[in-house]
Image (tube, rainbow, N blue to C red):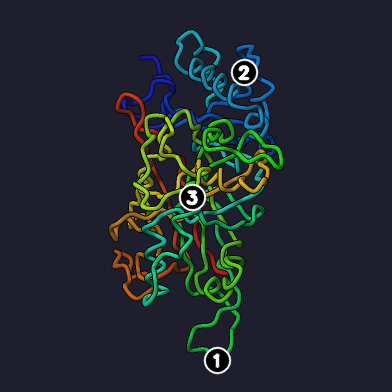
């Protein structure tokens, strides 16, 4: 009996031809040679080699060690390359050329798939912002006065963004509890996660020219899962008056796969109803395409699911975040990354951080391997997600995993 082709996927495979996320990989035989790959089921297609084998005009974009050249090529190129890739993995006549270029996932090493330019992190979940406000301002308003008028964000550290699977060293820094007479220095005792979604910019923009809501698809190449590791005790002491700094900048983990926006057309949903009038540059009420995404996220600690945050509940959309990020004339660069902020839903089991899940450590999680308030050395966090795809399929997002090691 002939061996089954790796292109013959099981029914319902979330990484079928309807998905085709991009990544960068190396093989054991050529560990220094990074290649652009496309995930097909449990395999990675060497996209550059496939383009050469089939005489594709896109070989110059695909035979690269990074996604940046393809991302910079613009929306028309993104669409045309995706159509070509779909044909390469679905048309039977291409199999003799394509099958030898497929590598089993467990035989390759995955790398950060793009060169990160700038990194911005937002604060877009009303449930998360409300929970945080109630924890830290129990006698005041949960939301700050500006929260429903603009997407709040801060610039993070692009140089410490790491690919899924990279160990995260517990950071040290200053911290001061209300009972401490003076600040102390040492390893963080409140190491946390933030389950987020990151959007990757492809096409740049000119400084001084804001990007409108309607131009979102012209600039954003795709999205990935992201874990914004957070040292809550360091953050609490440092963040007044300028905001997050060392409590965030030690590491941010992203998936090894970037899902193209086109793969998520069936997952577009309307955002929650807004209770305040928005200024014109953020007003998406009349937009033809809904701005939200129906992404179903799961957070696991040492293999145990502890939360399932729903991205569809996010108050501010990625298009609004992009518009706000550039409304002052700030330019976009290929490889810019902007993250949604913690994804949290209305119920406890939908909260996307330990800060909320344990109410700042006062309500420990009961797990098979013991109680948790915040992360311990050796703990491993994994984020996974899927979205509704065409014709009842599921679109899988690449996972984000990271293990805590002692500093």
Spot occupied by residue 385 in the image (x, y as percentages of width and height): 39, 43
Please give the name of the residue rendered at 60% of the width and 12% of the height, measured from the top-left corner.
54
Q: Is tag 3's residue or tag 2's residue first in the polypeptide sequence?
A: 2
Spot occupied by residue 195 in the image (x, y as percentages of width and height): 44, 54
- At mark 1, the secondary structure is loop
Where does label 3 land, which residue? 340
Please give the name of the residue rendered at 44% of the width and 16% of the height, measured from the top-left corner.
90
Query: On screen, 276 above or below 201?
Result: below
Spot occupied by residue 124 in the image (x, y as percentages of width and height): 45, 53
State the CA–CA distance, disc 3 to disc 1. 36 Å
Query: On screen, 201 above or below 297?
Result: above
- Decide if residue 393 is on the left or right side of residue 248: left
- At mark 2, the secondary structure is helix
Spot occupied by residue 301 in the image (x, y as percentages of width and height): 38, 58
State the CA–CA distance, disc 2 to disc 1. 65 Å
Where does label 1 land, which residue? 181
Q: Nearer the viewer, residue 293 or 253?
A: 293
Q: Crowdedness of circle 3 by 10 Å Cα count: few (<14), some, many (20+)?
A: many
State the CA–CA distance, disc 3 to disc 2. 34 Å
């Amino acid at each position: 009996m002939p061996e089954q082709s790796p292109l013959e996927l099981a029914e319902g495979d979330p990484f079928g031809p309807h998905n085709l996320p991009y990544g960068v990989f190396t093989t054991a035989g050529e560990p220094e040679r990074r290649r652009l790959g496309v995930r097909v089921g449990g395999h990675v297609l060497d996209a550059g080699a496939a383009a050469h084998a089939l005489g594709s005009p896109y070989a110059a974009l695909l035979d690269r060690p990074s996604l940046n050249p393809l991302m910079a090529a613009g929306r028309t190129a993104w669409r045309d390359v995706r159509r070509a890739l779909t044909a390469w993995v679905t048309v039977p006549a291409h199999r003799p050329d394509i099958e030898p270029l497929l590598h089993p996932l467990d035989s390759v090493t995955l790398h950060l798939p793009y060169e990160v330019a700038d990194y911005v992190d937002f604060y877009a979940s009303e449930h998360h912002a409300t929970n945080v406000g109630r924890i830290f301002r129990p006698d005041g308003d949960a939301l700050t006065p500006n929260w429903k008028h603009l997407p709040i964000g801060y610039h993070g550290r692009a140089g410490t963004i790491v690919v899924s699977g990279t160990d995260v060293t517990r950071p040290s820094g200053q911290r001061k509890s209300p009972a401490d007479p003076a600040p102390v220095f040492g390893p963080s005792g409140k190491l946390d996660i933030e389950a987020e979604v990151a959007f990757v910019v492809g096409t740049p923009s000119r400084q001084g020219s804001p990007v409108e809501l309607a131009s979102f698809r012209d600039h954003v190449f795709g999205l990935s899962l992201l874990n914004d590791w957070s040292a809550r005790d360091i953050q609490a002491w440092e963040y007044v008056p300028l905001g997050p700094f060392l409590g965030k900048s030690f590491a941010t983990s992203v998936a090894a796969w970037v899902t193209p926006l086109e793969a998520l057309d069936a997952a577009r949903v309307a955002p929650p109803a807004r209770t305040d009038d928005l200024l014109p540059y953020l007003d998406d009420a009349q937009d033809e395409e809904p701005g939200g995404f129906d992404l179903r996220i799961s957070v696991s600690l040492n293999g145990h699911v502890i939360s399932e945050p729903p991205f569809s509940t996010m108050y501010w959309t990625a298009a609004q975040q992009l518009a706000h990020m550039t409304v002052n004339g700030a330019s976009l660069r290929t490889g810019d990354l902007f993250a949604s902020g913690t994804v949290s839903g209305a119920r406890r089991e939908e909260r996307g951080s330990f800060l909320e899940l344990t109410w700042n450590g006062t309500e420990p999680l009961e797990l098979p391997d013991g109680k948790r308030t915040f992360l311990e050395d050796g703990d491993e966090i994994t984020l996974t997600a899927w979205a509704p795809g065409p014709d009842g399929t599921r679109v899988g997002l690449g996972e984000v995993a990271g293990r805590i090691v002692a500093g």
